[in-house]
Image: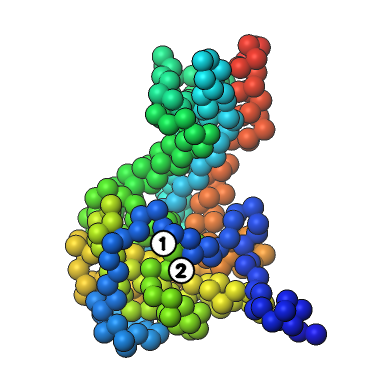
Amino acid sequence: MTADSLFGGLPVRLDPWQAEYGPGVTLDASPDQPSQVQLDVEVPADQWSPCVPAEVELPGHLVFVDGVRRVDARVVVQREQLTFGAFGSYGVGCVHVRDGQASFGDQHVGRVLVLGNGLILPGPVDVGPALHYRTATVAGPDFDDPARYIHTEMRRAEERLSRSLAEAHSDALVLADGPLSFETPIKGDALGYVKRLVELYLPREHLALLSALPLGHRTPLFALTGSRRFDRYSWFVRIADPAPGEVDLTGVVRLECAAGEVGIDRAIRLADASARLLPAFVPSRSRDPRSPQNLLPIGALEERLRHLLGDLVLVRRHIATLLAGGPRV
């Protein structure tokens, strides 16, 4: 009996990401949906096919930027109404790759105690040794509002680091993990690397093209315009083939760059460079639970940043002791 017959003829395939990380392919509606997707920026819309990357000059200096965040402990303030809050930590950093050698670069850890309903604390909160939380508030009453604030703080820190790296290293290509959700485009060569396919942006009939995209090939460029962000050029790249039984989109990632700052000719060269470079950074399935999309420098950086955040059990113990009014150690 075949797998398809076992499931009543449905082509059930494996998403290789471990369940605690969520799915690698979701195809939900994007929170920053552009008002227009233009397919004919590189080739006519009716001539789309896999692109073999041209022999372009590859950058000798790559910089991978990423961040991690976590909710250290959730809290509730009980007054006339319940107010939800959270102690949160985040870390951002980068990895430089030159001449085949990788090294960690700048790293930063931030901690914040966020309360909802506009509640404002008088000042920072010291929980324990090296555990200093600045305070912030959000207007909303929702349980998840403080966690969203922590995520936004991490993304802003990523933006500041990516921007400073792109402007300081004119010879480097900066790859920021995630979409370029910055308020203004970065000067210099910077790409957003989107490893989780939340939105195709393309017409549904192009799903077959993405599913069959050969290793090391890319799609033509398309433009994303009219969103809250700046206009972008984007493309998909196959950085690894799916293993037997896995969903066909495994190993397909999306990249984007600022359209106005880069221009179409430079964007095409960056797209070709990304298709030629990125497959070399794919981790083995045994090394990373989000392989193949979670590139080796990004995975190593995430591991280091989580270490810098400190042991979660100990951090929570310090927070619990503080809230219980006991002695801090």
Q: Position of residue 191 (x, y in %)?
A: 34, 62
Q: Amino acid at mark 2?
A: Val
User: Could you tell me which secondary element the residue under label 2 belongs to?
Assistant: strand
**Which class describes the residues within 10 Å of circle 2: few (<14), some (14-19), or many (20+)?**
many
Q: Position of residue 68 (x, y in %)?
A: 50, 45
Residue furthest to the right in view is: 1
User: Could you tell me which secondary element the residue under label 1 belongs to?
Assistant: strand
**Residue sitting at 54 percent across and 54 percent down?**
300
Residue 103 visible in image: yes
Q: Position of residue 56 (x, y in %)?
A: 30, 79
Question: Does 75 appear above or below 100?
Answer: above
Question: Does 92 appear above or below 261?
Answer: above
Disc 1 target residue: 193
**Residue sitting at 60 percent across and 54 percent down?**
21
Q: Nearer the viewer, residue 295 or 6?
A: 6
Disc 2 target residue: 253
**Which class describes the residues within 10 Å of circle 1: few (<14), some (14-19), or many (20+)?**
many
Question: Which quadrant of the figure contains the C terminus?
Answer: top right
Task: State yes or no: discs 2 and 1 in contact (Cβ < 8 Å).
Answer: yes
Q: Amino acid at mark 1?
A: Tyr
**Residue sitting at 63 percent across and 66 percent down?**
16
Q: Nearer the viewer, residue 57 or 1?
A: 1
